[in-house]
Amino acid sequence: MAKSQQTFNKIEKEKQRAKKREEKQKKKEERKANPKGSDFDIAYVDEFGNLTDTPPDPSRKIEVDAEDIVLGVPKKEEGEQEDTKKDKEGKVSFFDHSKGFGFIIDDNTQEKYFVHVSGLIDEIDENDRVTYELERGMKGMNAVRVKKI
């Protein structure tokens, strides 16, 4: 194909490819000139977990016993209830009987929770005072076991 028949876009792409090949060749030559291990800096971690270029101060070193490290969620003590299992109180701010869902506003936190007709014990209407429990749903916390007060 003659140069006059090539499009501007094709010419630009060819220039970019040539530039990349040239850069790659330069990097290859640099790696040959600087063997492995000579082109890196040493990084340290400070007491807050941040990377620094200064070594840690040995006088600030703290000894930690491996048995004292707890991985995971701490176990609950006896009598301690999960917050979502306690009966909460609130007011029904919206409920659509034809669609079968609505929302409850918590009395203490003023948060809105989704409620579905399948989570009802008693039939509810807007502005009803209710007690409920929370369960994690696909899109957040849902009110379940909803009863009128």
Image: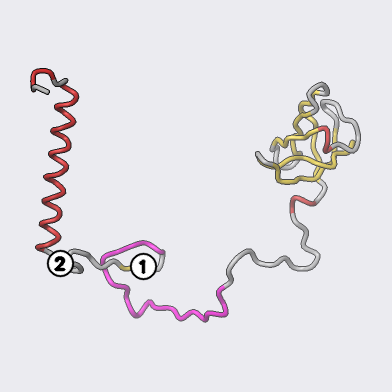
**In this rendering, position of residue 29 left or right of residue 97:** left
Position in image of residue 118 (x %, y %): 83, 36
Position in image of residue 125 (x %, y %): 85, 26
Mark 2 or mark 1, earlier in chain: 2
**In this rendering, position of residue 89 left or right of residue 21:** right
Quadrant position of residue 49: bottom left
Task: Provide the residue designation for mark 1.
Answer: 46
Position in image of residue 24 (x %, y %): 16, 49
**In this rendering, position of residue 121 left or right of residue 133:** right
Quadrant position of residue 11: top left
Quarter of the rendering occupied by the N terminus: top left
Which residue is rendered at x = 53% and y = 79% of the image?
A: 66
Mark 1 secondary-structure assignment: loop
Which residue type does callout 1 highlight?
A: Asp
Which residue type does callout 2 highlight?
A: Pro
Report the span colored magenta.
Answer: 49-69
Mark 2 secondary-structure assignment: loop
Q: Is residue 137 visible?
A: yes
Dot in front, 2 or 1 = 2
Near mark 2 (Cα within 10 A), the count class, few <14, some 14-19 or many ≥20, is: few
Q: Is residue 149 visible?
A: no
Quarter of the rendering occupied by the C terminus: top right
Residue 57 included in the magenta stretch of the image: yes
Position in image of residue 90 (x %, y %): 79, 37
- Compared to residue 79, the image places residue 124 above or below, namely above
Residue at the top extreme, as displayed? 5
Magenta span: predominant SS is loop
Q: Which mark is residue 35?
A: 2
